[in-house]
Image (spheres, helix red, strand yellow):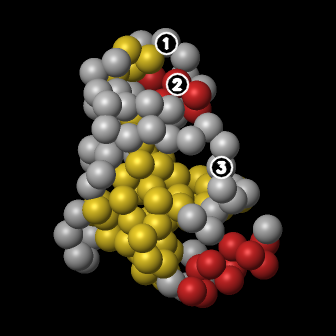
């Protein structure tokens, strides 16, 4: 079982298990298509961002960061997404976050969904070229 930030116990490890918390309702339908996009990311509430992890998917409205260092929904984050050839800067807000116990990290989703508030135009162009 995983406990989200609202204190609710989550029995189902699928994405629908994290649709609600006490402050934010996350829609069950996505606005834009997600693409598999595994790259390194630096993120954090300060600029320059101090935490390092990786992203597994990207859309033109946001990104999923796979990490066990999560921040509460509503937290503003600075992001630097690093592909092999370029670094893209963005800012976003945590929409949902789920932290798994260390022994379950390999078996369940642990991380954060981030909605972009500003994003490098070149990253959006790269997304659209792949979509």
Q: Quadrant of the C terminus?
A: bottom right
**Is 25 located above or below residue 104 in the figure?**
below
SS type, badge 1: loop
Nearest to viewer (mark 3 / mark 1): 3
Query: Residue 24 location in percent, x, y?
Result: 38, 41
**Is 34 located above or below residue 28 in the figure?**
below
Which residue is pictured at 50% across the width and 41% down the height? 26
* Residue 17 - label: 2
* Residue 84 - label: none
Query: Residue 57 location in percent, x, y?
Result: 62, 55
* Residue 30 - label: 3
Q: Is residue 12 visible?
A: yes
**Front-most of residues 44 and 124:** 124
**Is 27 located above or below residue 92 in the figure?**
above
SS type, badge 3: loop
Q: Is residue 30 left or right of residue 97?
A: right
Which residue is pictured at 39% across the width and 20% down the height? 2
**Front-most of residues 71 and 29:** 29
Query: Residue 54 location in percent, x, y?
Result: 49, 57
Q: Residues within 10 Å of mark 2 (few under 14, many from 20)?
A: some
Q: Residues within 10 Å of mark 3 (few under 14, many from 20)?
A: few
Q: Are marks 3 and 1 in contact (CB under 8 Å)?
A: no
SS type, badge 2: helix
Q: Which residue is mark 1?
A: 11
């Amino acid at each position: 079982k995983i406990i989200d930030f609202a204190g609710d116990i989550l029995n189902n490890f699928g994405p629908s298990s994290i649709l609600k918390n006490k402050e934010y309702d996350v829609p069950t339908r996505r606005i834009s298509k997600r693409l598999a996009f595994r790259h390194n990311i630096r993120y954090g509430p300060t600029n320059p961002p101090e935490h390092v992890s990786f992203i597994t998917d990207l859309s033109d409205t946001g990104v999923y960061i796979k990490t066990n260092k999560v921040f509460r929904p509503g937290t503003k984050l600075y992001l630097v997404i690093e592909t092999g050839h370029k670094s893209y800067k963005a800012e976003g807000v945590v929409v949902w976050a789920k932290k798994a116990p260390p022994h379950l990290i390999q078996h369940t989703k642990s991380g954060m969904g981030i909605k972009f508030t500003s994003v490098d135009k070149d990253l959006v162009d790269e997304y659209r070229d792949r979509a």
